[in-house]
Image (cartoon, rainbow, N blue to C red):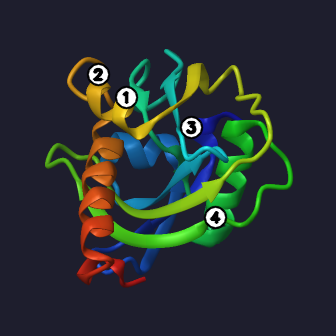
Amino acid sequence: MSAADEILDIVDENDRVVGQVPRGEAYARGLRHRCVFVWARDPEGRIFVHRRTATKLVFPSLYDMFVGGVVGAGESYDDAALREAEEELGVAGLPRPDFLFKFLYDDGAGRTWWSAVYEVRCAGPVAPQEEEVAWHRFLPEAELERRLGEWEWVPDGSAAYARLRAWRGHGGGADAAR
């Protein structure tokens, strides 16, 4: 089955399931669905940063500071976060990612999804999927900050990162509700 054929739950503005369609149709019609963003750090606290492959359905060849992806139909955010982190990092047996907060991403141009943000520590070496990740490295957060103006980043990851910075600065808040 191709990524475009994966079945997704379609959700409303309150994150309630209102239908199910293939991913390709959800993207083509701008239907709201669910995604997870996992902030992966190594034991030194560096952040896993990668460039997406040119074959990705959304945001091909752009950089991202999260691993993650869509939540499948009937799948929980928590299960999707663990599955996506293990798949994209190429690591089995990761600890369950810690839920941080959720927000509604909407770029105003037909891309909208409920976004659950998580954090996980990855102690072992990574072996990212070649179909998903064209380049990767664990970067200190100061270097990530320097690269924000130099590299072209996925817009939803940039939005999640801005919210993560605000969330860390305030210790939680209104967006922290599940």
> Reading the chain from its start, which is encountered first: label 3 or label 2?
3
* Badge 4 element: loop
Quadrant position of residue 163? bottom left
What is the CA distance from the residue labelled 4 to the residue labelled 3?
26 Å
* Badge 3 element: helix
Residue 156 is situated, as x and y percent measured from the top left of the image, at 32, 45
> Reading the chain from its start, which is encountered first: label 4 or label 2?
4
Badge nearest the viewer, 3 or 1? 1
What is the CA distance from the residue labelled 4 to the residue labelled 2?
26 Å
What is the CA distance from the residue labelled 3 to the residue labelled 2?
24 Å
Identify residue type, mark 1.
Glu
The residue shown at (64%, 64%) is 97
The residue shown at (45%, 71%) is 100
Q: Is residue 146 left or right of residue 125?
A: left
Identify residue type, mark 3.
Ala
Screen quadrant of the N terminus? top right
Badge nearest the viewer, 4 or 1? 1
Badge nearest the viewer, 4 or 3? 4
| Residue wearing tag 3 | 4
Screen quadrant of the C terminus? bottom left
| Residue wearing tag 4 | 97
Q: Residues within 10 Å of mark 2 (few under 14, many from 20)?
A: some
Q: Residues within 10 Å of mark 4 (few under 14, many from 20)?
A: many
Identify residue type, mark 4.
Pro
| Residue wearing tag 1 | 143
What is the CA distance from the residue labelled 2 to the residue labelled 1?
15 Å
* Disc assigned to residue 152: 2
Q: Is residue 167 above or below residue 21?
A: below
Q: Is residue 109 above or below residue 10?
A: above
Q: Residues within 10 Å of mark 3 (few under 14, many from 20)?
A: few
The residue shown at (55%, 58%) is 8
> Reading the chain from its start, which is encountered first: label 4 or label 1?
4
